[in-house]
Image (cartoon, helix red, strand yellow):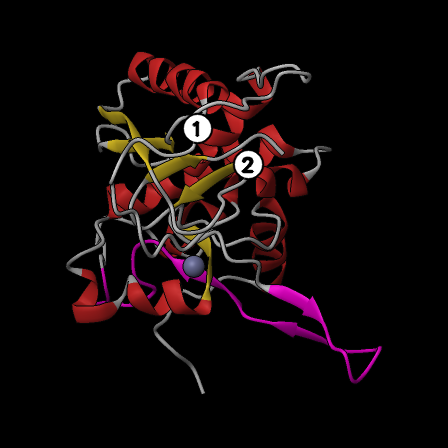
């Protein structure tokens, strides 16, 4: 059966996957799309898709009649996404996801992968650890003192700076809230370094706020939903 679709070849799909490191190219998603099966050592679970930036056939999302058949099925017209993002960009025939936006995702993603080649991905977790702060009743005036007398204060290193920028990738211009635990001078000073850095990168900053938490908050925490950084006691 012949089709009017300008599909990618298997070879093109393989190259797209690998150039994206099997990670979804939507900067707000970045889901890993492949995993070894636990039950069968010869199998893997794969949820990636090579998606068309402009549609493979007439009438499809972002269809561009100016392209030749070859251009439409070329790697230049493909982006690697997880299944969910691949479905998402085509909803309502793609009205919410313009060609230029998807091309930006692809460019950004390839840069990000390039930057991370041969680096430890797990380092990001040190900052990304998400906490659920249920109560921050700001009563004030509690637990002053006893601040890291013996150990060195934290420094906002270049590595931490680049991790933070990765976490905030695509959010430029949005306000970031920076909060530290009340009465902890070391945490306040570290949080202030973060605030200064973010402002230099054109992120408006709400803070540094000081809050009293119902449970001890340790280390550096980032809540991606609220764009809030919470600096707890040094670990
Ligand atoms: Zn995705």
Is residue 54 on the magenta stretch? yes
The label number, if any, that marks residue 25 in the structure image: none
Q: Give the residues in magenta.
A: 34-61
* The quarter of the picture showing ligand 1: bottom left
Residue 102, image x and y in percent? 32, 47
Quadrant in which the C terminus appears: top right
Residue identified by numbered label 2:
219
Per the model, the C-alpha gap separating discs 2 and 1 is 18 Å
Residue drawn where x is 38% and y is 64% of the image: 86
Residue 48, image x and y in percent? 53, 65
Residue drawn where x is 25% and y is 41% of the image: 100
Q: Is residue 147 visible?
A: yes
Query: Tag 1, which secondary structure?
Result: helix
Is there a contact, CB below 8 Å, between mark 2 and mark 1?
no
Residue drawn where x is 17% and y is 57% of the image: 96
Residue identified by numbered label 1:
165
Q: What kind of secondary structure does the magenta stretch mostly adopt?
A: loop
- Residue 131 left/right relative to 35: left
Q: Nearer the viewer, mark 2 or mark 1?
A: 2
């Amino acid at each position: 059966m012949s089709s009017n679709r300008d599909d990618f070849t298997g070879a093109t799909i393989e190259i797209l996957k690998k150039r994206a490191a099997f990670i979804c190219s939507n900067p707000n998603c970045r889901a890993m799309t492949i995993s070894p099966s636990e039950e069968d050592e010869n199998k893997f679970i794969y949820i990636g898709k090579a998606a068309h930036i402009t549609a493979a056939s007439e009438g499809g999302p972002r269809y561009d009649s100016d392209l030749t058949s070859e251009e439409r099925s070329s790697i230049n017209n493909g982006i690697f996404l997880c299944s969910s993002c691949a479905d998402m960009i085509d909803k309502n025939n793609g009205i919410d996801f313009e060609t230029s936006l998807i091309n930006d995702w692809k460019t950004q993603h390839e840069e990000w992968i390039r930057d991370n080649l041969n680096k430890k991905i797990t380092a990001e977790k040190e900052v990304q650890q998400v906490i659920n702060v249920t109560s921050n009743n700001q009563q004030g005036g509690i637990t002053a003192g006893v601040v890291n007398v013996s150990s060195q204060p934290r420094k906002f290193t270049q590595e931490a700076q680049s991790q933070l920028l990765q976490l905030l990738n695509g959010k430029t211009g949005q306000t970031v809230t920076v909060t530290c635990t009340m009465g902890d001078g070391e945490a306040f000073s570290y949080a202030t370094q973060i605030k200064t850095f973010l402002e230099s990168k054109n992120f408006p900053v709400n803070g540094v706020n000081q809050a009293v938490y119902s449970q001890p908050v340790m280390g550096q925490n980032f809540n991606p939903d609220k764009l809030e950084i919470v600096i707890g006691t040094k670990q």
